Structures are given as C-alpha cells and as structure tokens.
Amino acid sequence: MAPSDAARGLDAADVLDLADPAVVTDPYPHLARLRAQAPLAWHSGLGLWVATSHEGCGAVLRDRRLGRVFRPRTPEGDWETFNWLHADSILDSEPPKHTRLRRLVAGAFGRGHVARLAPRIEQLAEGLLDAAAPPGSAEPFDVLAAYAEPLPVLVIAELLGVPEADRVHLRPWSQAVVKMYEVDRTGEQEAQARAASAEFSDYVEALAADRARHPGDDLLTDLVQARDGGDRLSGRELVATAVLLLNAGHEASVNGFGNGLHSMLSAQPRPAVDIEDPAAVERLAEEFLRHDSPLHLFERTAKEPADVAGLHLEPGDKVAALLGAANRDPAVFADPDRFDPTREPNPHLAFGAGIHFCIGAPLARLELQVSLRTLWRRFPGLQLVEAERRPTFVLRGFERLVVSPRA
C-alpha cells in the first residue's frame, strides 16, 4: 500500500501513544497535533490507518467500499457466542444482510416506542434523584453511580420489556462485553466477556421465547413479530439485536452524559442554559456529545480497492475514524476546545455516519435531553466536587463524578 504524501514517514503512535496515561486522560492536544501533521496516518500500535479530520472521518464512515468486516475470535469454540452476537448484529454486518436487518429493526422501532417513553424517562429520572439527594439534602453524591448509570439501563429495560427483577444483571453483562473493544484488555477480562456473552444471550433468548407465547407492548415483542413480506429476524439475529441495543445504548448514554456534564461544570465561566427552552436543551445535549465524545474510534475495513481521503486502500486494509478528533476539528467547529451549549449548527459525528449511523440515536437524544432537564430543574446550582477518569481510550468516560447539589 502506498501512503499519501501527508502520511508518508509519520507513525501516528509517536503522537498518539495509547499506552501513555496522559494521552488516555486527555487525548485532545495529541489529536490536534496529529491532525495538524497528517489528517490521515498509519498507527503502528493499532495496526491500522487513522483519520483525524472531520472530512476524513466522514469519508471513512460513508464510503460503501469500506465495511464492518467482523473477524471471529479464536479459538472459535471458546468464543462461539461472542462471535455470533457480533456477526448477526446490525453493527458488524454489511449489505445485503445489514440492509435487511436495519429495515426489520427500524420497522419495530418506528411503532412509537421511543416517543411514548418521554414521560417514563422523566419519572425514572425523578425517582433516581430522590434516592440520590432527597429534598433539602446538601450532601455530595456520585452522579454517575446514582443517576447516569442506572437510568439508561432502566430505560432500555422498559423499552424491551425486561422484568424489574432481572434488570440488575444487565449492566454487569454489558460492562463485561464492551471491555473487548479496548486495546489494553487483560486475559481475565476476555474470560469475563465470554461468560457474560453466554449468560446475556441465554437470558434474551428465553425472554424472546416468552414474548412469542405472551406478546406485550414492548420493543422485544415487536422484534419477535417483525416481518417484511416473508422475511423476519432469525433467533440469533433477534438476540444479537437486543444485546446490541443494551450494550451500545447503555455505554454510550452513560459516557455521553458524564463527559458532557464534566465539560459543562468545568467550563469557566459556567455557561447559562434556559432549561425550559426545548431548543436550548437540544443544543446543550448535542454539545455534550461533541465536546468530549463517548466513542473515540470506529474501525472500517476495505472490501475492495479504494481511494479514500487521499489514501489508497487494498482489500483487508483497516482504517479508523477517530471521532473525538473529528468533533474538535477547527475547520468545522469554531473554537473547538470550548464547551459552547449555544453552538449551532453542530454537525458532530458522535453517532457515526453512513449506513452504520446509530439506529438508537433518537432514543439516546431523548434520554439525554430529559435527564439533563430533570437534573437542572432539581439542582440549578450543581457543582463539581471530584472526577475520576476511566483509563480507557475507545469508550471514553468517567469512573466517578461526584457533585454537590448546592452551590
């Protein structure tokens, strides 16, 4: 493969060393330097090309000659469930399978499930805040553990119709599986991911079988019944879809909320937002997602020879869109390092682009807007007390975010 002139002679790992705790803690200065040197360059540590500009990342995500080519983990006997949970999901499939799966899942989503959840999301959010900081309390609390982490699990569980008694299992399963997307996972974490995949899939399969016998007013029932002509989801496709919704929806929601809240509470001076103005809340939520993106790396593989963003790729070559870098590109965003809740337009790539644009984006946006409005109504003087960053790059978030309900 012949590198472009801009990328020739540069190893992105020299600028973006993912083994360096300083890079993981705050990647943005390093991403900016890399973007300035070469918007697209080879990263020897990752073994792939990385795009750091908004234009380059958009091209990588939208080019149909690049795909999500899932390679089963080996030995396949040990990874059987983990492998098919990915191979049969929308995220890791390509047309024509992807087109068929997305059509069936979008049809089930399109039956009003997201719109009807708004009052319930607010009710769940109010209940969590009541428990975290009862009226009159001035005690600091971890807003992630008490609010941001349980809320998306409860919302997605409501959406799919998971019984309340079983919801305690969802977050541990999800956390174990998504550890596999990091570059520095351990053997113990891989074993936990295999076990969680098996338990998670067995549970969803049993729940889907129950919905087939006893339909309910939930998304899982609609997925079980989803048809397009004579077509329908297979058993594995249905389970993989439900697991993907739980994993992706939960992790992205927690990190998007936590990262954005930290950005807002750390900003000097603190930006003012009219929380009763729906348009202002929408802009605030989009800036949460842009300023400190919850997902930083999305990988694609060339399916055929292709020239993308000035780079020639042969089949099998890999390239990743660095979404956090794209969302701080000064060519698209004025003063990109500043947290600006009035920013408009805000064409961030936090949900991806192209055929793999996040199918759950409407739910994620609704959940973020409702949770922010509910939090600010309750605690207009909210202050940051302590923040502990999670030491991960791909899924960027906080371990703890302690806040005080009063200024």
Image: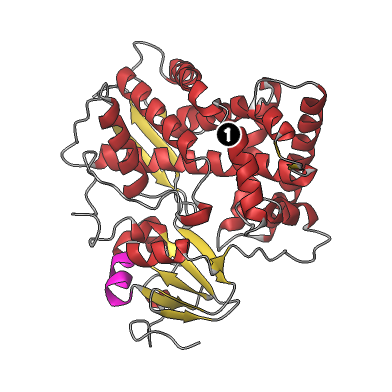
Q: Nearer the viewer, residue 388 or 173?
A: 173
Picture layout, residue 188 above or below residue 238: below
Q: Nearer the viewer, residue 81 or 301?
A: 301
The region drawn magenta spans 30-38
Q: Could you say which quadrant of the image residue 310 lies in?
A: bottom left
Which secondary structure lies at badge 1?
helix
Q: Is residue 398 visible?
A: yes
- Is residue 301 rendered to the left or right of residue 10? right
- Is residue 63 rendered to the left or right of residue 103? left
Residue type at numbered disc 1 = Phe
Residue 293 x %, y %: 39, 50
Residue 399 colored in magenta in the image: no
Q: Residue at x 48, y 27 (%)?
A: 146
Residue 220 x %, y %: 68, 31
Picture layout, residue 218 above or below residue 328: above
The crowding category of the residue bearing disc 1, from other C-alpha atoms within 10 Å (few below 14, some 14 to 19, many at least 20), is many
